[in-house]
Amino acid sequence: MMKPGAFATCLFLPFAAAAAPAAAAPAAGLQSQELTRAGVRVGFEIAPAAAGEERVQEGRPASLRFHVTDEGGLPLTGLRPAVWMDPRKTSGPPDAKLCEKTVQSYLQPSLGAQAMVDLSNYYVLTLNDEPSISVLDPIRGFSSSKLLTLVLLQAPGEDWVASREGTRLFVSMPAAGKVAVVSTASWKVLANVEAGPQPSRVALQHDGRYLWVDNAGRGRDGGTVTVIDAAQLKQVARIPTGAGPHELAFTSDDRYALIANRAGGTVSVVDVRSLSRVRDVAAGRHPVGLGYSPLSNSFWVAGEDGSIVAIDAGRQAVVTRIAAEPGLSSLSVTPDGRWVFVVNRTKDTVSIVDASRNRLRYTVTVGKSPDQVSFTDGFAYVRSLESEHLALISLARLGKGEEPTLSDVPGGQIAPARAAVASRAAAVVAAPEPGAALIANPADGIVYYYMEGMAAPMGSFSNYKRVPRAVLVSDRGLRETSPGTYAATVRLPIGGTFDVAFLLDSPRVVHCFEATAVSDPAADARRKAGGAIVPLFDERSVALGAPLRMRFQARDSKTGAPRAGLRDMSVLTVLAPGVWRNQQPAAPQDDGSYEVTVQPPKSGLYYVYLQSPSLGLRFEQSQAVVFHVLPGKTTR
């Protein structure tokens, strides 16, 4: 059920490889090679992603592409190639035998075999009822566990959204009044940004510049939304709107943001350039759903009173009003903008509006108390709170002059309402594999993997006694941007020559291409001026219950002399597979060394990472020190 030849990197990923489609490669700086094998032709390209840059450079985005065709030039579509990039360790290009061996090492569940850039895997994330996010590895695990790590939050999350490149995750925490910013490279919280009272729904502009946050409480001022700079991670505006909770949507060019004010009964139009409200549009009583259709350049609004309203994005005025039955609770627009799905939780129906013609086309009866609609390329998934089954509606059959085709698929063993938790984030998302979806059932505590066309889910992932309120995919793989072209944007962490290992499972093609990146002079100078951290102990196992005392020495990279008095050295200790972690500063000692003491909570395998920004060393760059904590006696 999972993509072939894929595995998860361990605990810390040095640099995230974004799954977003790469921009068109400029002629300057283009590196290209081609291979024909087993009837398959593979063309490899890498070039600077930014226009005007002449060479691929460390730390700068680079566009990576593979054009896969048959020998006659016919594109091969629907593939999931796996790719790894690592600095070359041999004097010349690896031959076929060494390349095959290298790829096999990446495929093994080994903590040591990690590529510097991994474009082979994806992770399944669950937003839990407790203040945490589970990071599940669906391909492989450690010690039979699929749990890669837990991201601990200040308070339970309500909604979330990934950055455009997939390198950051923004999570609203109503009880904390903040948005957590999580790195998907290290799975660490980078910042907790003040986000106004009761931050709930979050939405990111198409260009990724601003994160918009619904302040769900009504407040004395009648309601607000908070705007956060997604790069600087700071609040830049709090805009008065009608009373919330709010729904958020943007025009395709991010010129305007629309805010549906449920208690206020209006839709506020906000000028993104000036971050100011320009007008309010009356759109029915208690607007509960909002979505944008690029096809018709209009916003669609659903009201609890049964009204479905279209607002022209250019004129910012109502152009269509459709009367449905009262009880509407949410609205979703298909990715192509053609169809608008409006859920009626009271009547157990979904109304489907043709946005190209501004008219209601279908009303479909689904399970009891429907609350969410999610989409894959082929189907709309309707979750119902009081049914363990999902209703699947074929998108291909809509508009064909016949009633929609409905399928009934199990989404777990227990109806979601039995969990007594709710979230505004999606409980069903498309999987990276075509024609597949991931379904989080909070009552079961399980995430199910469903392949379309099957009578039941093909597999499941335990959330280890945690309640998954919502699910999300962090995809590290290549994305098919056009027929037969698979692309990503990467940042190479160092300069030099890289072996680019390419694996296609069927037909099997393994080959190591070559890419080069020039060093960043400033980064190179920092590295030369930095140093290394060396452990000053021999023990590699301790008894459970005994403190783990570790001493380190910092050494100058040029002279090898000890460097004393550093105030920014810190130590991160992680119990594999990441279910427990401890980070604390290392205390300077009189002899110039540094010491830290950790109390391991249970037996197992522990990884210790070191960081000192003044030495130019981060956790994800350090070589891990490995400890075994044993239930018995200490050994050496």
Image (cartoon, helix red, strand yellow):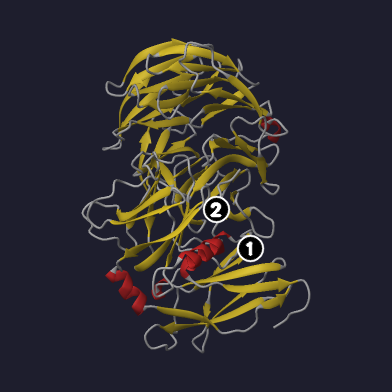
Q: Position of residue 448 (x, y in %)?
A: 64, 39
Task: Name the kind of residue labelled 1 in the image.
Answer: Ala
Q: Label 1: state its secondary structure.
A: loop
Distance between the Cα atoms at labels 1 and 2? 20 Å
Q: Position of residue 68 (x, y in %)?
A: 40, 46
**Residue with the mark numbered 2:** 6
Q: Position of residue 116 (x, y in %)?
A: 45, 63
The residue depicted at 66 percent of the width and 38 percent of the height is: 458
Q: Quadrant of residue 281?
A: top left
Q: Is residue 496 left or right of residue 141?
A: left
Whether 242 is drawn above or below 431: the answer is above
**Residue with the mark numbered 1:** 576
Instruction: Determine if residue 407 is in view.
Output: yes
Circle 2 Cα neighbour tier, 10 Å, few/some/many (<14 / 14–19 / ≥20):
many
Task: Name the kind of residue labelled 2 in the image.
Answer: Ala
The residue depicted at 34 percent of the width and 74 percent of the height is: 526
